[in-house]
């Protein structure tokens, strides 16, 4: 961090005569690492009155904070629609997307991913007294299924063969589980940790089907070719994995978000 700062100061100092360069140094001095996310995904990112970074808290926020610190930068969080994250990364609007984002071949065409840091799978969130959804097969039998737009669960239910007329797409998992609660939907298909958090917070239950829902791995997305940032991120992730910190964060935030 210090080295980089000294270098930046030296470059700015040398350029002090050139007005044009001054502007460039001004921008550089903002010294922020911009994380894009969609903060409706507990325990990875959610908003709260007293968050770790402003109103934001969660496993990803804690990881991103470490990355920014290691880089000698201040973490800025831009909360946006999940569906817009990939293009925000590739156009450089944000430096990285830290959003419980599953690595997929399709996404890899537009962004580069860091090493993975969490293993998840899709689950079905159903009413506590639901007796007819026991496996993924069961949601194909005319059940009303909710997903979140652009999430891996969205493409999965489509590929599985759930009739599109029976699929409801929403912007946030937090909102769509309400439709399970009020009986408009039979199941919401969403990532495991988030599904559990939302189920517990709303008196619903989770049905798993590891045979039908393969594991997914989360990683941080950066602009294609931004090796410098990926290397920095991977270094922090490796340290956090080795020290058991990621595991600790998962335990901490899983229980905190479930309690809400
Ligand atoms: N893992 C899923 C995906 O990559 C859902 C991620 C949603 N993340 C969020 N921050 N809202 O599609």
Image (cartoon, rainbow, N blue to C red):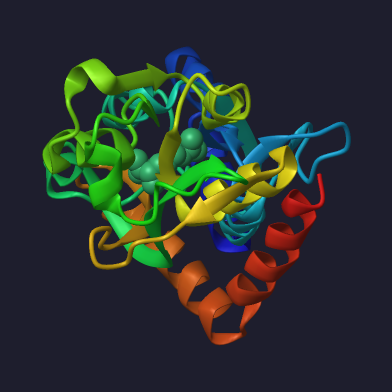
Residue at horizontal 53 percent and vertical 53 percent from the top: 206
Q: In which quarter of the image is residue 9?
A: top right
Depth order, front residue of 51/206: 206
Horizontal side of 222 relative to 257 (left or right) equals left
Q: Which residue is drawn at 55% across and 22% down?
A: 179
Residue 110 placement: quadrant: top left
Q: Which residue is drawn at 17% across and 46% down?
A: 108
Q: Is residue 218 left or right of residue 49?
A: left
Place of residue 69 in the rendered image (x, y in percent of width and height, measured from the top left)? 65, 56
Q: Is residue 103 visible?
A: no
* Picture residue at 56% right of the left edge, 26% below the top: 78
Q: Which quarter holds ligand 1?
A: top left
Q: Which quarter of the rendering shows the N terminus?
A: bottom right
Q: Position of residue 84 (x, y in %)?
A: 36, 22
Q: Say above or below: 164 vs 131.
A: above
Q: In the rendered view, tell whether residue 169 sits above or below residue 225.
A: above
Q: Where is residue 100 in the image (x, y as percent from the top left)?
A: 46, 48
Q: In which quarter of the image is residue 183?
A: top right
| Position above or below: 88 against 251 | above
């Amino acid at each position: 961090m210090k080295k980089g700062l000294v270098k930046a100061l030296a470059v700015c100092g040398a350029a002090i005569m050139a007005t044009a360069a001054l502007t460039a140094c001004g921008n550089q001095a903002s010294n922020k690492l911009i994380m894009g996310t969609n903060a409706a995904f507990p325990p990875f990112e959610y908003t709260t009155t007293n968050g770790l970074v402003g109103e934001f808290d969660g496993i990803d926020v804690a990881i991103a904070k470490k990355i920014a610190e290691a880089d000698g930068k201040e973490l800025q969080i831009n909360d946006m629609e999940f569906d817009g994250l990939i293009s925000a990364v590739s156009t450089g609007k944000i430096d990285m997307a830290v959003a419980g984002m599953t690595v997929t071949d399709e996404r890899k065409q537009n962004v580069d991913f860091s090493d993975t840091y969490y293993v998840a799978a899709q689950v079905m969130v159903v009413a506590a007294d639901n007796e007819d959804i026991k496996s993924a097969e069961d949601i194909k039998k005319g059940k009303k299924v909710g997903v979140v737009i652009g999430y891996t669960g969205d493409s999965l239910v489509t590929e599985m063969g759930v009739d599109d007329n029976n699929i409801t797409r929403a912007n946030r998992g937090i909102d769509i589980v309400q439709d399970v609660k009020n009986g408009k939907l039979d199941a919401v298909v969403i990532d495991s940790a988030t599904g559990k958090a939302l189920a517990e917070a709303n008196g619903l239950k989770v049905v798993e089907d590891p045979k039908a829902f393969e594991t997914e791995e989360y990683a941080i997305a950066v602009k294609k070719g931004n090796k410098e940032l990926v290397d920095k991120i991977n270094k922090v992730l490796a340290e956090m994995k080795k020290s058991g910190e990621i595991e600790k964060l998962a335990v901490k935030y899983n229980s905190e978000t479930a309690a809400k």
